[in-house]
Amino acid sequence: MCVYAHMTINDPDEVPKGFAYVSDLAVLTPYRGRGLGRALLSRAEQYARERGATTLRLLVLSQNTVAKQLYIASGFRERFIQTTKRLDLESKTS
């Protein structure tokens, strides 16, 4: 896990306020189901608070239902939904 305590985004759709960001939170398959992800997330929150952050963000793949369940149970809420379309898979005939 990596936690950035002070992040800002220069985007017109964003409120100009800093936040903390969790990057690369991962638990290896043999160690899952033991509460390690929850413990890491809790430590990330503590770390961010200690450094003055009032908001904590992270990204999760939409197919990663286990991680999404953990984040929702930990108080995270969806903020954006990003969509993707593969253009190289479409038929080239018209």
Image (cartoon, helix red, strand yellow):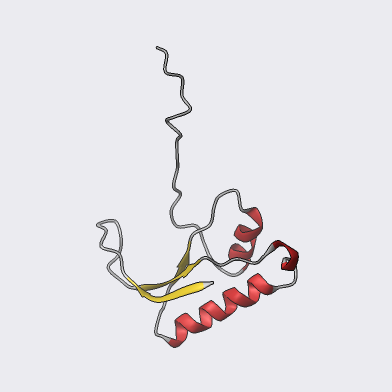
Q: Give above or below for 83 relative to 28.
A: above
Q: Position of residue 52 (x, y in %)?
A: 39, 84
**Label total for image:** 0
Residue at the image position 46 percent from the left and 49 percent from the top: 81
Q: Position of residue 25 (x, y in %)?
A: 56, 67
Task: Say left or right for 66 vs 58.
Answer: right
Task: Say left or right for 54 vs 35.
Answer: left
Relative depth, front residue between 89 and 11: 89
Q: Position of residue 21 (x, y in %)?
A: 44, 70
**Rendered image quadrant of residue 8:** bottom left
**Rendered image quadrant of residue 67:** bottom right
In which quadrant will I find the C terminus?
Answer: top left
Residue pushed farthest top? 94
Q: Give above or below for 67 relative to 51.
A: above
Residue at the image position 63 percent from the left and 64 percent from the top: 70
Residue at the image position 72 percent from the left and 66 percent from the top: 32
Relative depth, front residue between 27 and 59: 27
Q: Position of residue 30 (x, y in %)?
A: 75, 65
Relative depth, front residue between 68 and 1: 1
Task: Say left or right for 54 vs 67.
Answer: left
Residue at the image position 59 percent from the left and 78 percent from the top: 42
Q: Give above or below for 33 relative to 80.
A: below
